[in-house]
Image (cartoon, grey):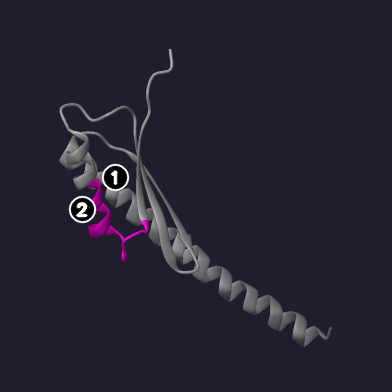
Amino acid sequence: MTIQALVGSLLLGLLCGCNAVDAMKDGMAQSNAVADDLQKSLGSKPHVGFNWFNGSLVNVTVEFDGAPEGKTLAEINDAARVAVKKEFPQMPKKIVLAFDVDAS
């Protein structure tokens, strides 16, 4: 492999990496915005994760430390759907709701 081909391959790899880094930064900002929206609407701030695959948002996971007080599952479901739709550029294939429970 010539030096020019090696340098070209390295530059191409770095450019591809920049898109991945930008996508990760954007996703983190969007997941933080979803968490903030849900804290305002439900009174409990969840941990929000996401999974992109080939440019498609596969899933968004919304994990609460216990169920938000005084809210029904339908209310939590609706609030999560609204927040994800508002903050992410596309709807995921699925939204996963999770609730941590005390194991003791």
Badge 1: residue crowd in 10 Å (few <14, some 14–19, many ≥20)? many
Q: Earlier in the sequence, mark 1 or mark 2?
A: 1
Vertical side of 100 occupied by 38: above or below = below
Badge 2: residue crowd in 10 Å (few <14, some 14–19, many ≥20)? some
Q: CA distance from mark 1 to mark 2?
A: 12 Å
Q: Residue at x 28, y 54 (%)?
A: 84
Residue 99 is situated, as x and y percent measured from the top left of the image, at 34, 32
- Label 2, secondary structure: give it: helix
Q: Is residue 89 magenta?
A: yes
The quadrant of the picture occupied by the N terminus is: bottom right
Vertical side of 99 occupied by 97: above or below = below
Side of 48 relative to 38 (left or right)? right
Which residue was labeled with disc 1? Answer: 35
Q: In the image, which residues are magenta?
A: 79-93
Going by the numbered disc 1, the residue's amino acid type is Ala
Residue 52 is situated, as x and y percent measured from the top left of the image, at 46, 60
Vertical side of 100 occupied by 90: above or below = below
Which residue was labeled with disc 2? Answer: 82
Residue 57 is situated, as x and y percent measured from the top left of the image, at 40, 61
